[in-house]
């Protein structure tokens, strides 16, 4: 059985991006009537990330990430 402190250590860093497979998995779970909390626990990603992916999918019809801007590093 996992505790909350164990989950925090296993969570993704803020700088990591989810790959396309995880985005599609979130959408698939949502379509199977899983709650945001259930998806978060199942995939070990923050609830806010799950919510954002679902919201973006509903609004835009896609969960794909867009390329980041290429600003110069000063």
Image: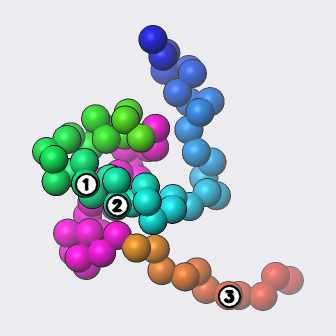
Tell me the CA gap for discs 2 and 3.
Answer: 26 Å
Tell me, for residue 24, which label it has, or none. 2
Front-most of residues 74 and 42: 42
> Cβ–Cβ below 8 Å for labels 1 and 3?
no
Q: Secondary structure at mark 2?
A: helix
Q: Residue at x 56, y 61 (%)?
A: 17
Q: List x then y, in percent, for residue 66.
A: 48, 80
What residue did someone put label 3 on?
70
Q: Secondary structure at mark 1?
A: helix
Badge 2 or badge 3: first in the primary sequence:
2
Q: Residue at x 43, y 55 (%)?
A: 22
Q: Which residue is mark 1?
A: 28
Task: Give the label on residue 3, or none.
Answer: none
Q: What separation in Å lies between label 1 and label 3 (alpha carbons)? A: 31 Å
Q: Which of pointers 1 and 3 lies earlier in the amino acid sequence?
A: 1
Is 27 left, or right, of 44 in this rendering? left
> Is residue 51 covered in magenta?
yes
Question: Against 60, is 9 above or below?
Answer: above
Stretch of the chain drawn in magenta: 44-63
Residue at the far top in the pictured view? 1
Q: Residue at x 29, y 69 (%)?
A: 56
Name the spot of residue 28 as percent of width and height, x first.
25, 54
The image quarter in which residue 42 lies? top left
């Amino acid at each position: 059985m996992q505790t909350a402190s164990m989950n925090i250590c296993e969570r993704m860093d803020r700088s990591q991006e989810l790959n396309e497979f995880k985005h599609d998995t979130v959408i698939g779970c949502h379509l199977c009537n899983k709650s945001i909390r259930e998806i978060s626990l199942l995939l070990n990603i923050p609830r806010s990330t799950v919510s954002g992916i679902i919201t973006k999918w509903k609004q835009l019809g896609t969960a794909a990430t867009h390329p980041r801007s290429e600003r110069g590093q000063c």
